[in-house]
Image (cartoon, grey):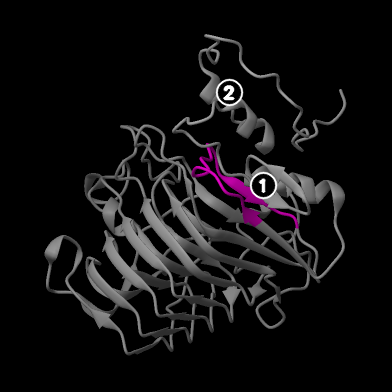
Amino acid sequence: MPAMDHRQPKSRPRPPMGPGERPASGQSSALQGTGYAAQRERLRPGAESKPMAQFEVLGERFDTLQQVHDHLVAVAPPGPEVVIRLTDGAENRPTSQTTWSYYQPGQKIVLDGVGRRVDGMRGERPTLGYFLSYRPIIGEGHGQDRPAAANLEVRNLTIRGFQSGGIEISPQTGAGKEHAWDGGRTAFLSGAHIHGVRFKDLGSKRSAPGDANWSKLQFGAGGIMARGLTNSLIEGNEFSRLENGSVEGAANGGKAGPQLMHAVYLNNQSSGNTIRDNRFDAISGDPLRVSNGSDNNQVLNNRSDNAGKQAFVSDWFNNKDPKNPQTASHGTVLAGNQIGSGYGGGRGVKPFHRKESKGVRPELAR
């Protein structure tokens, strides 16, 4: 069977509707998957609904970011930068996580939302996973002392309605499931930039019963979740309503679930990063978490309110995991931050808190 071509067909002229002619039943749902211009033509003049925004890259338009990824894999375009933009239209509504492995060492990927929104909510239930799981295949030889260029910038976008979170960054040395957690073990990235992004309504609080499960890695982990990410900048973003409910299998009969969700989670030797000028509101876990040797990160001029169970920044590590014992994180710098109440109105939030765990846990949400 020939490979499927995800590019959208060029629009064709459509004859005008006859007297009394009405759009076919279900036409609005059928618009997804058609070309953008064709969508415009198929909507009757004066209709309130707008066609879904699409992702535009290299002169082509696609319904999903995963289709953009697959297209880049197929064509391998040259050049120092590839810019992906959301087009005009109603919010884009993904139905699954985008898993991104495409990588060219000298080519930067820029995802520019142009102020528009992607919304994973389906009947007020979040889509499983992250909006973007950035797992570039960078090859061997990129340890902590020689990280590969991250080649990623995300800007001017609202991300809503995903259970695990907004953006995950975890580089891989090679393809295959066995490389899923290379970030911070054998693969490191440097120089990502995430700015002007609004992360909203993420986590498992709104998940269907049974969908939040600790052992299945189905729960909220972070608006931004990073492994092996160094010398990167997270600035000028807004994080609001990042909340978990009870998570089956988590500690205390699932009641520890809310504490698993953070705005920014720097894990597995994610060191030397700067988190500045961000706003955090309604975060059920500590807004920022560093874990497992994530050293010398700077947390500057951020504002938080109604966020955190124990601290504004927490250091968590598990030194009893028989497969991968972890280490504390050192050198965190906090300056100029405004720390309000804890999640649910609590007043006992500390600027910084370190917790050593002796339990065994899975890797954070997929």
Stretch in magenta = 85-102
Q: Earlier in the sequence, mark 1 or mark 2?
A: 2
Comparing labels 1 and 2, the label whose residue is closer to the camera: 2
Inter-mark Cα distance, 1 to 2: 34 Å
- Percent across and percent down for residue 199 are 41, 59
Q: Is residue 29 left or right of residue 275?
A: right
Image spot of residue 238 (x, y percent)? 38, 66
Q: Residue at x 29, y 62 (%)?
A: 285
Q: Is residue 80 shown left or right of residue 32?
A: right
What number is the disc on residue 30?
A: 2
Q: How many numbered circles does the render carry? A: 2
Residues packed near mark 2 inside 10 Å, few (<14), some (14 to 19) or many (20 plus): few
Mark 2 residue type: Ala
Q: Which residue is identified by label 1?
A: 177
Looking at the image, is 290 positioned above or below residue 174? Answer: below
Q: Position of residue 64 (x, y in %)?
A: 63, 42
Residue occupying image coordinates x 63% and y 48% = 99
Q: Element at badge 1?
A: helix
